Image: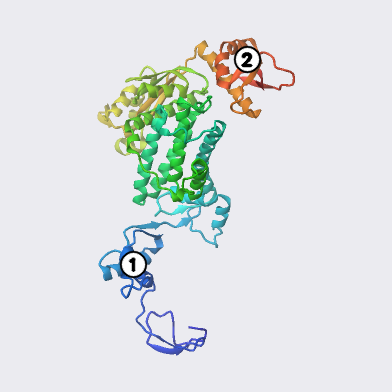
C-alpha cells in the first residue's frame, strides 16, 4: 500500500471492516474487504487459470489436464499440493495431477537444517564448480528415497562421484586404450556376428535386465531404485567382467575371443550412455559422442537426440545370471578365506570346497582362475574341513531363560557345531534340558562362529560355506614364486613406461632356489609378460631393480626387444 497507511488499519488482523484509503504512491483508492482467501489458492488455480479457462483455450486445457507429474518439497503438502487437489476436486471432480513426487529437505551431514545462522550452508555453485552438475545429480538420485531428508556435503558428492562416475569412466578409458591400439572399428565387428563367451553372454543378459528394470522404474518414478541398479551394474562391469577378461584385449589381431570382448564392451558402453542420459546428461553425451558419433557420422549428434535403449528379451538368461550370482558369492567368500589365512591370491592352492551353492563346470573354471585354486568341489557335508563354536544370543535368550544362561552356554559349547548349523539350515530348532527345564533354541537364539581346522580356512554367509585348503606342496610353492616374478615384471614394465604391446627381454639375478624356479617356469613367465627370453645378465646401461620375492632377494632388468 505504501508507507503512510492509516494506523487504524492493522494488517495482521485476519478480518477487518471495509475501509477505503488512497494509496500515497499511486493515488488510487484501495478498498480492503474481509473476504480474504489463502494466497495459495491462486497457485492452486494454476492448471486452468494459466490458460484463462473456461473463458478460452479449451482445447489446450483438455490436452494438458491433468498433469502427468508434479514435484515440490514436503513443505508444499499443506500449500500447493493441497490447494491444487482441493480446487480441482471442487471444480472438476478429479485430481489435477496423476503423480506427485514429494522431495525431502536437504540437511547438513549432521542432520541439521541448513542455515546461515549455523554456518552450515553449502553453496550449490561451489559443488557445481568442483564436482559438477552430474555428480550432484547422482548423489541425490542414490542417497535415498526422494521424500526422505538428504544429508548433504561436498565430500559426500565426491564419494558417489568416485564410486560411480569414476568407475564408469575408468572402464571407458580401458576400452579406448585398447581400441586405439588395435584400431577397433565397431562397424566392422558387429556384436551379432561375434562368437560370445560365457562372460559376454552373462554381461549382455545383465545389461538387458537392467534396461528393463530402469525403463519400468522411470515410468513408475522409481528413480532411486533405477539409479542404484545402474550403479551396481557398473560395479560388476568394471570389477568382474573387465577385470576377469582383461587379457582378452591383449592378443594380436582382431578375431575370435578378442573380437567378442571388444564388441561386447563397446555395445555395453554405448547402451549405458543412453541409459544414464536422464541421470547424468553431460557424462552420457561425452561417452556417446566419443563412442558413436566418431564412428558413425550419420548418427544423431547427441545422445539426447537418440532413442532410449530398448530391452532385448532374447538376450536375457535368468539361469545364467543366477549361476553367475552364485559364483560371485563363492568368489567373495574365497577371497575372505585367503584374507583370513593371510595368503596372497598369487599363491596357488590345491582346492576349494563349496557347500550350499552350485553352478556348472564352465562357471567353476572362472572360480579356479579367479581364486587361483586347482580344483573346485561341491560338497553336501563340510564336516571334514569346518567346525563351529556356538554361543547363546543374550538379546533373545536373556528374557526367556535368565538364570539358565550359564547352563545353556555350557551345553552349546559341548555340542557338535555342525549338527546345530545343519539343523538351523533345515529350519529346525535344537533342544536340551537344563535343571529340569526344556530349552528350545532357534537359529536367531544362537551365535555361530567358524572354528577353523588346521590346514583349512572356512567362511560362511547366507547359507553358503566355502573352505580353502591352505596346505601347500613344494610344487604349489614354486608356482607361487613364479607368479610373484610375473607380478614384479609387470610392475617394472609399467614403471618403465613400456607400451602394453611391447615385446621385451628379461634378466633375473637371484639365488639358486629362485633361479631354479624361474628356469622351470620361464615359458609361463614369458607368455604372461610378452617376454622373448629370460637371461642372467643384461646389456650395459639397462637398469636393475631390486625386489624381495617371498623373502628371496632378486634383481630384475627389462629392455625392449
Q: Is residue 541 above or below residue 48?
A: above
**Of the residues under marks 2 and 1, which one precedes in the sequence?**
1
Residue for point 44% across, 83% down: 10
Mark 1 Cα shell of 10 Å, populated few (<14), some (14-19), many (≥20): few
Residue 180: x and y in percent read: 56, 34
Residue 433 placement, left or right of 27: left
Dot 2 corresponds to which residue?
534
Residue for point 27% across, 71% down: 91
Quick one: 432 or 497, which is closer to the camera? 497
Quick one: 556 or 282, which is closer to the camera? 282
Q: Is residue 190 above or below residue 286?
A: above
Residue for point 42% across, 49% down: 144
Mark 2 Cα shell of 10 Å, populated few (<14), some (14-19), many (≥20): many
Q: Where residue 60 is drawn, which disc sits there?
A: 1
Residue 387 appearing in the image: no
Question: SS for tag 1?
Answer: helix
Residue 31, quarter of the rendered image: bottom left
Residue 433 placement, left or right of 249: left
Residue 532 appearing in the image: yes
Residue 369: x and y in percent read: 46, 22
Residue 446: x and y in percent read: 34, 31
- Looking at the rendered image, the disc whose residue lies closer to the viewer, 2 or 1, is 1
Residue 1 placement, left or right of 218: right
Q: Where residue 238 is drawn, which disc sits there?
A: none
Amino acid at each position: 500500500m505504501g508507507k503512510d497507511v492509516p494506523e487504524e488499519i492493522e494488517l495482521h488482523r485476519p478480518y477487518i471492516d471495509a475501509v477505503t484509503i488512497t494509496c500515497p504512491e499511486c493515488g488510487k483508492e484501495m478498498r480492503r474487504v474481509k473476504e480474504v482467501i489463502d494466497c495459495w489458492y491462486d497457485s492452486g488455480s494454476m492448471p486452468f487459470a494459466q490458460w484463462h479457462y473456461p473463458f478460452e483455450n479449451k482445447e489446450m486445457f483438455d490436452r494438458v489436464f491433468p498433469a502427468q507429474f508434479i514435484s515440490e518439497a514436503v513443505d508444499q503438502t499443506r500449500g500447493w499440493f493441497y490447494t491444487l487437489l482441493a480446487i480441482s476436486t471442487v471444480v472438476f471432480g478429479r485430481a489435477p495431477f496423476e503423480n506427485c513426487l514429494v522431495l525431502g529437505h536437504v540437511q547438513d551431514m549432521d542432520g541439521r537444517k541448513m542455515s546461515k545462522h549455523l554456518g552450515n550452508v553449502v553453496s550449490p555453485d561451489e559443488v557445481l564448480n568442483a564436482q559438477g552438475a552430474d555428480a550432484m545429480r547422482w548423489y541425490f538420485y542414490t542417497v535415498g528415497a526422494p521424500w526422505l531428508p538428504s544429508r548433504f556435503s561436498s565430500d559426500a558428492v565426491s564419494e558417489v562421484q568416485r564410486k560411480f562416475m569414476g568407475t564408469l569412466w575408468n572402464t571407458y578409458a580401458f576400452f579406448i586404450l585398447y581400441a586405439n591400439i588395435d584400431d577397433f572399428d565397431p562397424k566392422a565387428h558387429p556384436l551379432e556376428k561375434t562368437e560370445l563367451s560365457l562372460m559376454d553372454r552373462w554381461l549382455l543378459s545383465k545389461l538387458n535386465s537392467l534396461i528393463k528394470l530402469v525403463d519400468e522404474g522411470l515410468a513408475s518414478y522409481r528413480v532411486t531404485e533405477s539409479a542404484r541398479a545402474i550403479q551396481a551394474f557398473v560395479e560388476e562391469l568394471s570389477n568382474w567382467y573387465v577385470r576377469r577378461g582383461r587379457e582378452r584385449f591383449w592378443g594380436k589381431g582382431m578375431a575370435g575371443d578378442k573380437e567378442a570382448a571388444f564388441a561386447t564392451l563397446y555395445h555395453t558402453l554405448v547402451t549405458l550412455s543412453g541409459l544414464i542420459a536422464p541421470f547424468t546428461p553431460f557424462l552420457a553425451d561425452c561417452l556417446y559422442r566419443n563412442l558413436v558419433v566418431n564412428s558413425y557420422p550419420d548418427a544423431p549428434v547427441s545422445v539426447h537426440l537418440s532413442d532410449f535403449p530398448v530391452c532385448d528379451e532374447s538376450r536375457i538368461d535368468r539361469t545364467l545370471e543366477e549361476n553367475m550370482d552364485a559364483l560371485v558369492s563363492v568368489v567373495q567368500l574365497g577371497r575372505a578365506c585367503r584374507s583370513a589365512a593371510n595368503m596372497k591370491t598369487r599363491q596357488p592352492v590345491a582346492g576349494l570346497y563349496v557347500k550350499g551353492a552350485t553352478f556348472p563346470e564352465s562357471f567353476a573354471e572362472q572360480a579356479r582362475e579367479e581364486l587361483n585354486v586347482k580344483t573346485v568341489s561341491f560338497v553336501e557335508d563340510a564336516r571334514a574341513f569346518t567346525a563351529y563354536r556356538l554361543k547363546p544370543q543374550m538379546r533373545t535368550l536373556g528374557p526367556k531363560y535368565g538364570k539358565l544362561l550359564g547352563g545353556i552356554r555350557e551345553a552349546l559349547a559341548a555340542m557338535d557345531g555342525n549338527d546345530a548349523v545343519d539343523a538351523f539350515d533345515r529350519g529346525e530348532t535344537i533342544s536340551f534340558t537344563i535343571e529340569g527345564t526344556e530349552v528350545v533354541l532357534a537359529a536367531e537364539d544362537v551365535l555361530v562362529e567358524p572354528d577353523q581346522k588346521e590346514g583349512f580356512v572356512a567362511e560362511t554367509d547366507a547359507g553358503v560355506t566355502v573352505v580353502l585348503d591352505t596346505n601347500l606342496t613344494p610344487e604349489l610353492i614354486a608356482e607361487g614364486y613364479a607368479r610373484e616374478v610375473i607380478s614384479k615384471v609387470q610392475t617394472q614394465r609399467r614403471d618403465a613406461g613400456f607400451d602394453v604391446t611391447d615385446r621385451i627381454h628379461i634378466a633375473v639375478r637371484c639365488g639358486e632356489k629362485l633361479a631354479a624356479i624361474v628356469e622351470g617356469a620361464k615359458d609361463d613367465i614369458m607368455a604372461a609378460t610378452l617376454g622373448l627370453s629370460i637371461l642372467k645378465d643384461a646389456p650395459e646401461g639397462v637398469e636393475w631393480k631390486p625386489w624381495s620375492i617371498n623373502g628371496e632377494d632378486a634383481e630384475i632388468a627389462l629392455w625392449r626387444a
